Image (tube, grey):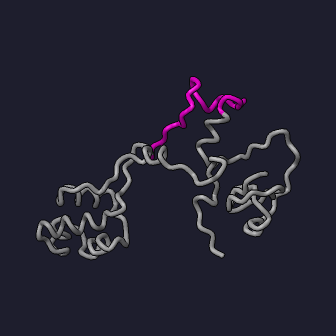
Amino acid sequence: MVQCEMCGAETASPKKIKVEGAELDVCDNCADFGTEVKTQQSSSTSTKYSTSSSSGKSSGSTSTGGSRSSGGSRSRPSDMFDDMDEIAQDYDDRIRNARESTGLSQEDLAKELNEKASLIRKLERGDMLPSDSVQNKLEKKLEISLSTGSAGADDEEWSGGSSTGGTTLGDVVKRKD
């Protein structure tokens, strides 16, 4: 039995469909969400796109394309986003609480930061994320941190809800029926 890459259901005869450029093996119920792809028979069952980092680790020893890994390392290559800090989910509360504790109004804070008061209102409501420059100004003025730290640490802790241990699209996306 094969697992549907969209909803995670077990299926004996998956169909290969294309959804917004990605080819997926799906069950009959999910086949309506894309266009069916006619494929030629080949000796390899691997797909062009990988959606989970664990599949790259497990097939590293059997892979013939060794140009991607260097020195037999099984960790994924780092990219520029590994070094970037994420904005905290409660950034709006942090800004509002810090502003109120200093006794500043939204208009006063905006003047001191050389920004518009409407920007401060939108940030405190959570309607928009601060740009890097505004984030730096807020952190300096209010002596707070709006960052959660490195995003790379969160990737290691999260595991998909699939019974096979691999993450499917169904683990991540909510379906609207």
Picture residue at 64% right of the left edge, 36% below the top:
58
Number of marks in the rendered image: 0
On the image, the x and y values in percent for residue 28 come to: 80, 65
Q: Where is 68 relative to 160, above or below?
A: above
Q: Quarter-wise, where is residue 176 in the image?
A: bottom right
Mainly helix, strand or loop, the magenta region?
loop
Q: Residue furthest right?
A: 41
Q: Is residue 68 magenta?
A: yes
Q: Where is 147 relative to 61, above or below?
A: below
Which quadrant of the rendered structure holds the C terminus? Answer: bottom right
Q: Is residue 78 magenta?
A: yes
Q: Quarter-wise, where is residue 46 in the image?
A: top right
On the image, the x and y values in percent for residue 150 come to: 38, 46
- The residues colored magenta run 60-81
Q: Residue furthest front?
A: 163
Left/right of residue 12 with respect to residue 103 in the rendered view: right
Left/right of residue 110 with respect to residue 82 in the rendered view: left
Q: Where is 26 relative to 110, above or below?
A: above
Q: Quarter-wise, where is residue 89 in the image?
A: bottom left
Q: Nearer the viewer, residue 73 or 8?
A: 8
Picture residue at 60% right of the left edge, 30% below the top:
69
On the image, the x and y values in percent for residue 22 come to: 69, 56
Picture residue at 28% right of the left edge, 59% below the top:
135
